[in-house]
Amino acid sequence: DNPIVSIVEKCRQSQASLKRIIESTSDDESLLFDALNLHDELQLVLSKYEESQAVKVEAVPVHCSRQSTENSALSTTVEQAEKPEQSEGTLQSNQ
């Protein structure tokens, strides 16, 4: 297991616990204030983690896409180079 993934899971579990505390706390303003601040900090950390994961996921297809485009261009060039020879061979056999 990846330790970062484990920490993220713990943060999500803690966030759910904090939501329950926030929803059930009405008489202790200090506890509510601390829980809200901690919830916001956890949300910020989780958002940054998710953004970093999105960047990693987006980075892979861009590279593959560029390689695909290069391969496609190379394939087209090869096909165009082969066509005149095939056409000439067809013309010579017809004559």
Image (spheres, rainbow, N blue to C red):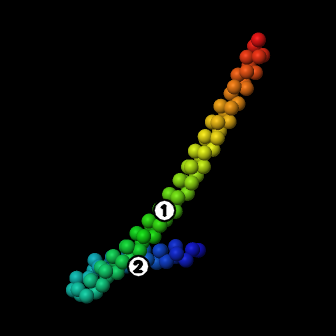
Mark 2, secondary structure of its residue: helix
Quadrant hosting residue 39: bottom left
Residue at the spot 61% in from the left edge and 40% down from the top edge: 73
The three-letter amino acid code for the residue at tag 2 is Ser
Q: Nearer the viewer, residue 3 or 66?
A: 66
Residue at the spot 60% in from the left edge and 45% down from the top edge: 70
Residue at the spot 36% in from the left edge and 77% down from the top edge: 41
Q: Residues within 10 Å of mark 2 (few under 14, many from 20)?
A: some
* Relative horizontal placement of residue 4, taking residue 82 as reference (left or right): left
Q: Position of residue 23 (x, y in %)?
A: 28, 77
The correct choice, above or below, for 84 with respect to 1 in the image is above
Q: Which residue is mark 1?
A: 55
Q: Which residue is mark 2?
A: 14
The correct choice, above or below, for 48 with respect to 38 in the image is above
Of labels 2 and 1, the one closer to you: 1
- Quadrant of the rendering where the N terminus is positioned: bottom right
Q: Residues within 10 Å of mark 1 (few under 14, many from 20)?
A: few
Q: Position of residue 13 (x, y in %)?
A: 43, 76
The correct choice, above or below, for 83 with respect to 57 in the image is above
